[in-house]
Amino acid sequence: MVTIGTKINGEARTVDLDGGESAAEVIRDRFGLTGTKLVCGGGVCGACTVRLGETPVASCLLPATAMRDAEVTTVEGIGSPGALHPVQRAFLAHDGLQCGYCTPGFIVDAAAFVERWRAEHGTAEPDRATIAEALAGHLCRCGAYAGIYRAVAAACRGEHDEGPDVIVRVDGPEKVTGEAVYTADVQLPDMLHAVIVRSTTAAAEIGDIAFGAAPYAVELLPEDRRVRWAGQPIAAVAAETLAHARQFAADVTMAVKRLPFVLDPELAKSDGAPLVYAGRAERKTAPMSGEGGSPLPVSWHGNVRGPNSIRYRATAARHRVKDARAAGDAGLVELEFETHPQLHTSFEPHATVADWSDPELLRLWVSTQGVEMIAREVAKRYELRPEQVEVNAEYVGGGFGAKLTVGPDTVAAIELSRQSRRPVRLVLSRAEELTATGNRPGSRTRTALLVDDKRDVQAMIVDTESHAGVAIGTSVAALCMLVYQRTPRLARDTDIVTNAPPGAPFRGPGGPVAAWALEQTVDALAHKLGRNPLELRQQWDGNQRRQGLYTWAAGLAVWRDRPVTGSQTGRFRRGVGIAAANWMYFVDPGVEVAVSIEDGGLVATCACQDMGTGSRTVVARAVAEVFGIAPEQVTVRLGRSTATTPHGPASGGSRTTVSLWPAARDAAKKLLAEIGGPVTAAHNGASATAKRGGDRGLRAVPVTMSEIQVGRGFTGAVHVTEVEVDTRTGKTRVLTVHGGIATGRPHVPELARSQCEGSIIQGVGLALYENQILDPHTGLTLTANLEDYRVPQLGDTPEITIHFHEDGWDRVPGGGVGLGEVATISPAASVGNAIFNATGWRPTTLPVRPDRVLEGLR
Ligand code: FES
């Protein structure tokens, strides 16, 4: 044990160290300065950056003893609400953040950079390369990079040295100062720390488990005690400190009967392959990789489930394609595409704090996309009354679809709290997050597209085999049936189960993979026919909203001036590609918002959450517009579900904003009508509630899945992307992306733009870098850290413009629908088409790694 003295944010502190702690752990857990975030734990992502003296350092790698006699500045010391640093004000004004989990690290480093820059260059603006280099050690999974560039450049220009704060996101001040408390930051008195014991083999039967001296332990195995993938939770232990819990976890022993396993989907299909699920009862336990409800009942053959087919004159489609193939018809294109799993890797890992010390009240803090969903499922699982469960998620550090269910972290924390009658915190490590919390499944898709001599579609066949590890229910081919001309067509989706980690819904589930295949097939056909690929889409596409986007795209200079495919011969070749996207309109008509007056101010309440998509700001703006005040004057209470909180939407399925906005606006209107004028303290206690409801006068809800209802009409997106391919190294750079979005009126335009920019960044990641890789001998995830699992960085960010086509959704309350998913679908496909335009070689396998480019060009 050693005692050191340090000065942190100007305050002298002493702390006892046992010698093994990092500075980040001490800053967070001992000094309670949780603005410093832990994401990668390996000095890669920059979220834990603090200043040691004047130098920004990654505190996760810094021994705590290095703080001895040093001056340490955390994000809390950079500025505070009311006294913000110019960089913090610039991030607020230019929306350089979404979920905010990476933001403190960016702020600490950007403040140091801007101070240096201003001292040396006055108010000159640095170019993008200089900013990218200065902040190269920082990652943002939400993809807020475009806003970060804008913010840092503006701060360097001196635009935020003084003047009133411009606040785009109402919870921005808490995020840029480190005051926002996420689940991973929650500390309760007398709290225990828990860790999960995971399988290190991909298939096994587990016998008795010995927990040694662990004070609290729980098993997490399924009923049949089978392990089906490496990383599967087996048990969890809790102890006084995280270090102790890790030690107890390492000491857990168990009887393990190893079983044969299969990881390769092609091998999994073969006769005699080890079966992931041996019979009907076991198959019923398979998790779902897609959103919404139970899997459709389809047949299984070994590890093959399906196909699940969508048909429209499918026999005609088959015959036409077969005949065209035999005749060598120039109007037929057949291609095959392959994709690999993409990981969500939310920067706040899955985390739960459970407090069941009072047997009559289970209090939870969960990093989730659905506080109400967690409350409901937990109450059902533990047979509790609604008033006995309370779920909190004040701030959520990203989700992207992977935080829509009650996960093992939540179950384990609850069970361990029930045992100990003490609060228990369980936060996944980055390795666990990158292994066990889901992925966008890999796939192999075969397409056939046939047109006649008038270029009208005569047949379309899409056949997809998805491999979501042990999970089922992936839809890819089916999504291809929703666009272009209604002709004879056949879509077949088949699951191949393997002993790989389970897939999970990921932003537009199936959509980007479907577009990767379909939109490149359309492009290939256009090239073969010598047609403009945009005009071909204009000819086929019956969606009037997307037609508006085609007109917009046709006018872009970058599209008009694109090179002739394959015409370039130099080392660096530029190309431009286009791809379109289609998605559903979802809504939760039961959503309610309550608006009340407390202490002379407006308060809006709903059991929703804000994972960086801006729900809090949407509600604030809707209420503020009605009352003619600034959104910051509205207190928005989200991130909490109790028995009495008005029903809120989950943050998924592009239904959140379109459900919240009308309910918040209508509740505000009711309240205004009730009080008859400006809000004063005399109105304290007044309140009004409004329900979103379905779309009036229309058959708006033909399909219902849980609380999601599918409204009438499809949304649309079109992306036009310019790339540069280095034919010597095989490296592709995305230079510019123009994103056109047809989802009606954006309720908060700045946030809508930020969502669309982030979608493009994630699409660039899918296209060029991201790929979960397993050890073929063990099934363990090799890409279990942020060095080996490469996500886009600031320097990878293209110049982005976003265009909103606002027509076509006037009948929907609020005039606009969700865009988080449709904006994600076509970026990667547009990169593929741009690479083809640049080089004449079509990439079919994701990600488009340099070695694949070099191989293709050979
Ligand atoms: Fe950067 Fe979410 S805002 S990780």
Image (cartoon, rainbow, N blue to C red):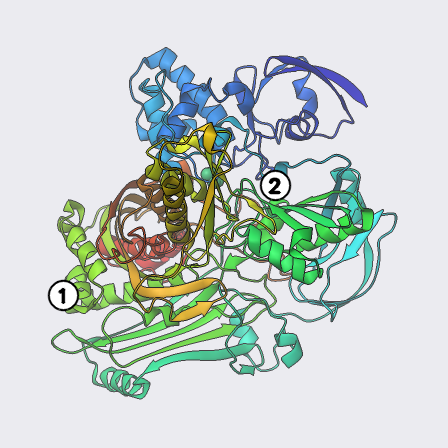
Residue 667: x %, y % from top left: 41, 46
Q: Is residue 108 visible?
A: yes
**Is 600 drawn above or below residue 670 in the view shown?**
above
Q: Are marks 1 and 2 in contact (CB under 8 Å)?
A: no
Tag 1 residue: 530
Q: Earlier in the sequence, mark 1 or mark 2?
A: 2
Q: Residue furthest right?
A: 213
**Circle 2: element type:** helix
* Mark 1: C-beta under 8 Å from nearest atom of ligand 1: no
Mark 1 burial class by Cα count in 10 Å: few <14, some 14-19, many 20+: few
Tag 2 residue: 183
Quadrant (top left, top right, bottom left, bottom right) of the C terminus:
bottom left
Residue 556: x %, y % from top left: 16, 47
Amino acid at the residue labelled 2: Thr
* Mark 2: C-beta under 8 Å from nearest atom of ligand 1: no
Q: Residue shown at 32%/34% (left/top)?
A: 628
**Is 762 drawn above or below residue 310 in the view shown?**
above
Residue 47: x %, y % from top left: 53, 33
**Circle 1: element type:** loop
